[in-house]
Image: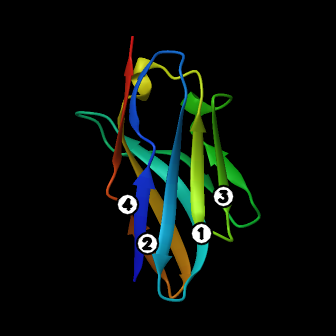
Amino acid sequence: QVQLVESGGGLVQAGGSLRLSCAASGSAFSINVMGWYRQAPGKQRELVARIGRGPSTEYADSVKGRFTISRDNTKNTVYLQMNSLKPEDTGVYYCNVIVAMPLGVYWGQGTQVTVSS
């Protein structure tokens, strides 16, 4: 079993920055992909960014050039640096981890990000 602890959400004005962190812990495991999803009120959860062990990265078109995902494999932690935030970035951000051994998919509890105009 893998536990995920997220931190770094909050309230920021448009144009500001936030950094989200998600640390994975638990019994022996091997993480494959780490990522961030978000869900705005009344909308479906959507991918924001994810990073493989390569580390290959993938971003939603709406955040390209503004957000940067990174990971520290020694700490089993993934980060999301969010710059030039916009009101449409508001939502609950969820950490997502895909574990290769043993195979499993895990979600964090979510952290609120609110961008005021």
- Tell which of 74 and 97 is nearer to you: 74
**CA–CA distance between discs 4 and 1?**
14 Å
Amino acid under label 1?
Asn
Which residue matches tag 1? 76
Residue 105 image label? 2
Q: Amino acid at mark 4?
A: Gly
Q: What distance separates the C-alpha of mark 3 from that of mark 2?
A: 17 Å
Tell me which label, 2 or 1, sits earlier in the chain: 1
Lateral position of residue 13 relative to residue 92, left or right: right
Q: Rate crowding at label 4 as few (under 14), some (14 to 19) or many (20 or more) other CA atoms within 10 Å.
A: some
Check the image and report above or below for 76 versus 94. Answer: below
Q: Which residue is label 4 attached to?
A: 108
Relative to 71, 115 lies left or right:
left
Query: Mark 4 falls on what kind of element?
Result: loop
> Residue at the top extreme?
117
The residue depicted at 67 percent of the width and 52 percent of the height is 70
Measure how far apart labels 1 and 3 are at the Cα level: 7 Å
Whether residues under marks 4 and 2 lie with C-beta atoms below 8 angstroms apart, the answer is no
Q: Nearer the viewer, mark 4 or mark 2?
A: 4
Image coordinates for residue 10, horizontal then vertical, percent: 38, 34
Crowding at dot 2, Cα within 10 Å, few <14 / some 14-19 / many 20+, comes out as some
Q: Going by the picture, which residue comes out furthest to the right?
A: 54
Q: Earlier in the sequence, mark 4 or mark 3?
A: 3
Q: Residue 66, position in %: x, y? A: 63, 28
Which residue is painted at 59% across and 75% down in the image? 31
Residue 88, located in which quarter of the rendered image? top left
Q: Tell me the distance, in whole angstroms, between the alpha carbons under discs 4 and 2.
A: 10 Å
Q: Nearer the viewer, residue 23 or 30?
A: 23
Q: Nearer the viewer, residue 92 or 19?
A: 19
Q: Which residue was labeled with disc 3? A: 71
